[in-house]
Amino acid sequence: MQIHDSPTPSVFKGADLGQGRGVYISTYGCQMNVNDTERMYSLLEMSNFAPVKTPEEADLIIVNACSIREKPVHKVYSEVGRYKKLREKNPRLKIGVGGCVGQQEKENLIKNQPLIDFVFGTDNIDSLPNLVSQVFSGPGKVIQTKFEHRAPYHVETLVRNPGVSTFVNIAKGCDNFCTFCIVPYTRGREKSRPMSHVVMDVRNLVKRGVKEVTLLGQNVNSYNSEDGADFADLLKKVATDTEIERIRYTTSHPKDFNEKLMHVMADHQDKICEYVHLPFQSGNSEILKRMNRGYTRELYIEKINQMKKIIPNLVLSTDIIVGFPGETEDAFQDTVSLATELEFETIFAFMYSPRPFTKAAQFTDQVEEPVKNERLNRLFEAHEKMAFELVKKYQDRTLNVLVESINEQGKAQGRSTQNKLVYFMGSSDLIGKTVPVRITQAFPSVFRGELQQ
């Protein structure tokens, strides 16, 4: 079996590489992965591949896999193994693996799962047509996982059908090296797009009917344009110099969330949503130090209080890791208290899982799995009780809801500026419009309401 690491070629110029073949991309992971999949589809569609809805229809299958949590490689092997019968029925079928798993595992994927024909990394998506061309034209396996550290981050947002709301990449990679996180190894070092490119992308998306954009990056508020603009500058520019109706962003790092950004949000609430996702990961300062997060519990609380003062209608969500190495019961209780005292309306909590290459994976005081699981359940129970109380304030309030879709039964779905998913009865002509909806039932994860005339 021939395996070679392909050099990074220029973008494929052939318009009929796909010859109408079907392409299916299986995606799991963060919003960045979802956005990467959309880019892959766009690039392949320009090369005359036809996106299909099932693997059975495809001549090309790509698994775009996240490795942020444990056992991602096993998940990839399991999924690819299910395609064995498809390969037997269709010998032309080619199977590739990308995303953070591709970047992390490289040739090991092909060595351990012969059904895989090619592997590519997170920095090689724009070379995908070239890579696929090599795979279809030769018998060998192809690997392309080289980081282009010195190349500028100049890309165009590629979205096939952006709909009402879509993502716009502003940065990629991370320089923080939290001891639990594999992102710097699978996404590379931080790179930011020029502010003018981002603004132009938003303007073009507006012309295509987009009403809301989410500015996307591993750490958006460390954004640094080549002209010296920071994230607050970019956010203000998108708000003032484009016709976009709504702006969101994710994900922020507490140590980089500054007062300048807070004032930009407060001054431009006609467009910038008041919802902020700000991961604290642990409520214990000693655990935060071991995580290399760059802030203490006290500094995090101080920053949130400052945000609430400047942005009085602020709505918060957060990420939390339970069972990090060395976490005692007292340290865990610090996390529970922070989640409840600061009144996070939504939490995304996970058990710690050791990741390859990370410092925390080498710590000797790992917490046992049953303990992590029990603590996670207790955290969810404590937060859920509080969350039901917090959402009572929305009962009978009228929220501005951007309508994203209508099903066959006439049920409309949209989001408020507080990032609440709202369902109500409506008509198809409402899609893309912002309408007033009175909330009749408020639950932590979903609201139900009535359209106000």
Image: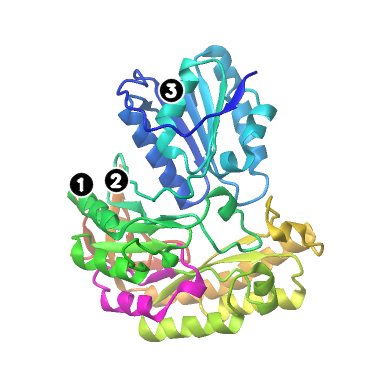
Q: Quadrant of residue 309?
A: bottom left
What residue lies at 22% left-to-right and 59% top-to-bottom?
244
Residue 132's x, y, as percent? 45, 25
Give the left or right position of residue 3, taking residue 95 as reference.
Answer: right
Local crowd at mark 3 within 10 Å, few (<14), some, or many (≥20)? some
> Can residue 370 be found in the magenta stretch?
no
- Seen in the picture, residue 77 relative to 138 is either above or below; the reply is below
Q: Amino acid at mark 2?
A: Pro
Give the left or right position of residue 269, taking residue 394 as reference.
Answer: left
- Seen in the picture, residue 338 relative to 80 is either above or below; the reply is below
In depth, the one of 17 and 25 nearer the eye is: 17
Q: Amino acid at mark 3?
A: Ser
Local crowd at mark 2 within 10 Å, few (<14), some, or many (≥20)? some
Residue contact at pointers 2 and 1, CB within 8 angstroms: yes
Q: Quadrant of residue 269?
A: bottom left
* Residue at numbered disc 1: 208
Q: CA distance from mark 1 to mark 3?
A: 31 Å
Residue 229's x, y, as percent? 33, 67
Query: Helix, strand or loop at disc 1?
Result: loop
Query: Helix, strand or loop at disc 3?
Result: helix
